[in-house]
Amino acid sequence: MAVTGTGIENGVLATPTGAGGRLEIRPGEHAALVDGRPLSLTMRELQLLVTLAEHPQRIMTREELFAEVWGSQPRREDRSVDVYVSRLRAKLGAALPETQLIHTHNGIGYRFSPDGC
Amino acid sequence: MAVTGTGIENGVLATPTGAGGRLEIRPGEHAALVDGRPLSLTMRELQLLVTLAEHPQRIMTREELFAEVWGSQPRREDRSVDVYVSRLRAKLGAALPETQLIHTHNGIGYRFSPDGC
DNA sequence: TCACTTGTGAAAATCCTGTAAACGTCGGCA
DNA sequence: TGCCGACGTTTACAGGATTTTCACAAGTGA
């Protein structure tokens, strides 16, 4: 079933074709592609990207992200989510310069924006 | 039937002519050629190469590869796929230096990239 | 016998992961 | 302005997990 307005089509999450290129996420194939070229993401990085991209424009708390990706509650001082967001941004930034897909919301969490805004 | 965009043409799998040379696989003739010169591959090695090359850019799990090449389910600790990938890479690397055709995806499997990316 | 292929075990090499700590930024306040 | 605290970002590292490679034994056929 295709869900419109969320970036989800046939199980594939995709961003609009922007200046930098198009990001396509295929969770079923363990793959994320930029203009057809696969990104080299680790399992955790991909899971985090998928989780963020499944809820475009929605601010997700660290607790929500941790629960989805790690499958449990984070310890209070746990910085894993932040570290993985940083690693993900580094790889996304290398493949899609000038595009800010993951936004920080101070004191709350992170938000995935397909169009970079 | 020619399938475009997958590297399959008339039953022949071929990589683009790159810096290192061109790889041509002719499953029907049990042969793999680099710039016209036949590679000396064993049956298993060739079957594995054909299976990978039939799905360019797609990450194939060890289970999928084993099923295609060995025709059964691998034992959990079975490293046959890894060993044959290693042997294949050694022979491909000797004939096509500087070209990485088979990529490892940690925790998942392997991916064949005709253009080495 | 000899050359070759195949599968297996295990050591070596490499990669991933979580954590701690250093670093940077921002805003409040004296 | 200068200091301080809160918070997010990034780097480094150690341990563990995974992959790569090597050596070897068994099997096959010329």
Image (cartoon, coloured by chain):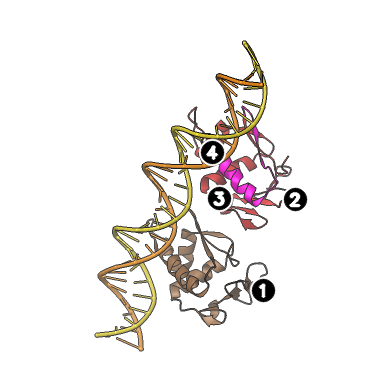
Chain colours: A red, B brown, C yellow, D orange
**Marks 2 and 1: which is nearer the front?**
2
Provide residue A109's location: percent of width, then percent of height: 61, 32
The residue located at (57%, 73%) in the rendering is: B20
**Marks 2 and 3: which is nearer the front?**
2
Characterize the local packing of mark 4: few (<14), some (14-19) or many (20 or more) Cα atoms within 10 angstroms: few
Name the secondary structure under disc 4. Answer: helix
Label 1: chain letter: B
User: Which residue is the site of mark 4?
Assistant: A83
Say if residue B4 shows up in the picture.
yes
Label 2: chain letter: A
Label 4: chain letter: A
User: Which residue is the site of mark 3?
Assistant: A41
N-terminal-most mark, 2 or 3: 2
Where the N terminus of chain B falls, by quadrant?
bottom right
Characterize the local packing of mark 2: few (<14), some (14-19) or many (20 or more) Cα atoms within 10 angstroms: few
In the rendered structure, find residue A19 and report the number of the disc placed on it: 2
Taking B62 as reference, is D26 left or right? left
Distance from label 3 to label 1 (Cα)?
32 Å
Q: In the figure, B52 relative to D6: above or below?
A: below
Distance from label 4 to label 2 (Cα)?
27 Å
- Report if the CB atoms under discs 4 and 2 are less than 8 Å apart: no
* Closer-to-camera residue (A104/D29): A104
Characterize the local packing of mark 3: few (<14), some (14-19) or many (20 or more) Cα atoms within 10 angstroms: some
- Is B54 colored magenta in this rendering? no
Provide residue A46's location: percent of width, then percent of height: 56, 47
Residues shaded magenta: A85-108
Provide residue A114's location: percent of width, then percent of height: 70, 44
The amino acid sitting under disc 4 is Val
Provide residue C4's location: percent of width, then percent of height: 37, 79
